[in-house]
Amino acid sequence: MKICVLGGDGYCGWATALYLSLKGHAVSVVDNFLRRQWDFELGAQTLTPIQPLSDRLRVWQKVTGKAIELFTGDVTDYEFLSSVIQTVEPDAVVHFAEQRSAPYSMIDRKHAIFTQINNVAGTLNVLFAIKEFRPDCHLVKLGTMGEYGTPNIDIEEGYIRIDHNGRSDVLPFPKQPGSFYHLSKVHDSHNIMFACKIWGLRVTDLNQGVVYGTVTDEVVLDEALINRFDYDEVFGTVLNRFCVEAAAGHHLTVYGKGGQTRGFLDIRDTVRCIEIACLNPANEGECRIFNQFTEQFSVLQLAEMVQAAAWKMGLTVEIDHLPAPRVEAEQHYYNAKHSKLIDLGLEPHYLSDSLLDSLMNIAIRYRERIDSSLFLPQVQWRNARNLRSRPSSLSVSAG
Amino acid sequence: MKICVLGGDGYCGWATALYLSLKGHAVSVVDNFLRRQWDFELGAQTLTPIQPLSDRLRVWQKVTGKAIELFTGDVTDYEFLSSVIQTVEPDAVVHFAEQRSAPYSMIDRKHAIFTQINNVAGTLNVLFAIKEFRPDCHLVKLGTMGEYGTPNIDIEEGYIRIDHNGRSDVLPFPKQPGSFYHLSKVHDSHNIMFACKIWGLRVTDLNQGVVYGTVTDEVVLDEALINRFDYDEVFGTVLNRFCVEAAAGHHLTVYGKGGQTRGFLDIRDTVRCIEIACLNPANEGECRIFNQFTEQFSVLQLAEMVQAAAWKMGLTVEIDHLPAPRVEAEQHYYNAKHSKLIDLGLEPHYLSDSLLDSLMNIAIRYRERIDSSLFLPQVQWRNARNLRSRPSSLSVSAG
């Protein structure tokens, strides 16, 4: 298949592009490198020393013989995006090209509005470009499990049958997102559902859980292909951050009680889920929604697992319960369905001791790159303005 | 109360500002006159000859002795908006300052993106300005009944109790909006609910039905105070448009079968509902949702009522069933709850023969201003681009 990966220089996008390329698909990548710019803004760098995309792609071609075409530009620029769609004529567009951090969106008003405009306008452009120039193309859009929030009922995959006053209908599952970022994905989902209805587009909206891990079969082919591994409070996902904290001898930074339960998945499952979605396109006019995760954990459970894995490696790690920077339930019911991707053939990589060991080993291998001043949350949901600063006292490891 | 009306030069905003002013509230108005600019863009003018806002306000003060303060600027400009909030120190902010036409949002990609960015960013600015500078102020935000779409179950006021797999929760009512404009209101609603949760803001989100009428007790005090009365395919609401079509001897332009059923209300009830909401503010952290309409009608029912009213006045009017320009159910179940404003004291003005007569008389009074080329729908939901044109053949009345 001809597959265009929007946001192909990012954490999930890069792993996906390589996976699809090695599987024999004709892959092209679109990126504007904003994610790398945010590293400078935040004073944070990925734990792993990632290479410029052009270098990565050159090495990829040398190692595998596979070419990945690169289009540098911004999906919020319609002239650019529509030209790419007309040039590539993709069978599937995989859309990762959004600002994906909840804390980043909560820094202040400008970051909130940037996140919503960037994500909503970018996705509207993608929908219009497909409608105008490639109407049969299948859009695989990354959403998030965070769109649902934590309702006191089971979370279904996108839609729920509601019986009410003697009548019944299948309706979009109610959304209670927990940040301006998560809200942007809810806005996207509504826009997408409408575009499918009026234009007959084919879309798979993947409500992805929290991704962990960095190693995939493809990136290990050469060190120059290494994927990014964020551990800072803004872009670092929780399990990755805990492993780096443990390797640095830092306390694990649990927010509040740590009863926040979420769906998680290994990045090796992310890339497989994307391929499964591409190989099984949605029907014309169908807005198909999959919950893309493999296991549920509470934050505290993950901290305890990392603590145990560290102990086996001779590291003693403590768990801190920090004042919760977010406004969210710290203990709650959580049961989200996730059978549709399994039905289509996903064989999950469950979180194991060996995976935790591997994550810890990566953290230890790049230990000299760890900046422990990046661990503590500085973005408070209750503030309208968060001035992020890193006084030197913060950069001393607590371990 | 000190009440700041955002969008106070528009159809609902102007009527509301005068009503609140005469009731003794200290009213200030914010507007950027974009709505008047769109008249030029669309080549359409309100049936009624409205005066510049500064003139209207001068006449208002002369006639009533009441001063309404005017701040000219755009709510998407945060420096401007936050200065207004700090200067006025309002007890309530009534927010009408959005692009409110579904067809306008469906003209093409630029109009879709403009509508969503303008409305979403404007409302985010309002939320941030209140949080930062007037956190106890009550926001009264205009949403639309169109957020709900036409589900096959009863529509509740904002929230619905869902029993599912043996558990139960009260969740936001699922939304199925039918245009990029209606989607922008859904995005607003989600953002607002979140702001109430994290910052403890007080908000009333009014899901308003389709408004009709132009005469209120205040605007009749002087002809210079006359409100706008849109009848064109883009901004004209359906009952107003039918009355003007009848007065012009034009066929009534029903889209498709005309079974589209919606909630409607008289503009005299709009202004009273706003006051009721202001006088009964939401609690701290509460996102209260009212369905603001008084009666349900199908489009065909309205057409037949206008036909009958015209016949009594000696006008023979036919009903045309045009190919539906929108993508929507033309026959469907519709039962939306709307008791909360009644419970707080609303005494509805139901649609009556005398009101229809009054609307028709206004249409006849300003008959020479009618441009019948504006009646026929030119914005097709199924197109990604609608080039609106008005060939001379269209400007011949069909009546």
Image: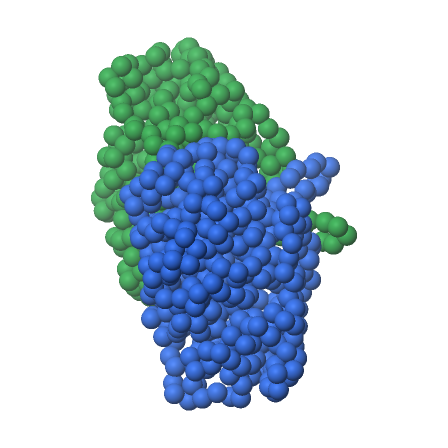
Chain colours: A green, B blue
Residue at 49% x, 65% y is B220
For residue A115, what is the image quadrant?
top left
* Placement of A308 over or under B271, stated as above or below: above
Task: Tell how many labels.
Answer: 0
Front residue of A169/B110: it is B110
- Looking at the image, which residue is at 61% across and 41% down? B171
Q: Quadrant of residue B259?
A: bottom right
In this view, B363 is above or below A142: below
* Residue B301 seen from this side: yes
Tell whether B94 sits left or right of B279.
Answer: left
Q: Position of residue B305 (x, y in %)?
A: 65, 75
State left or right for residue B131 relative to residue B277: left
What residue lies at 28% left-to-right and 38% top-to-bottom? Answer: A38
Residue A212 visible somewhere in the drawing: no
What x and y, as percent, mark residue B129?
A: 37, 39
Return the x and y of residue A215 as percentages of the image width and height.
38, 34
The residue at the far right in this view is: A166
Most foreground residue, A269 or A183 = A183
Q: Residue at x 38, y 58 (%)?
A: B62
- List x then y, in percent, for residue B390: 39, 81
Q: Nearer the viewer, residue A252 or B49?
A: B49
Relative to A45, B155 lies left or right: right
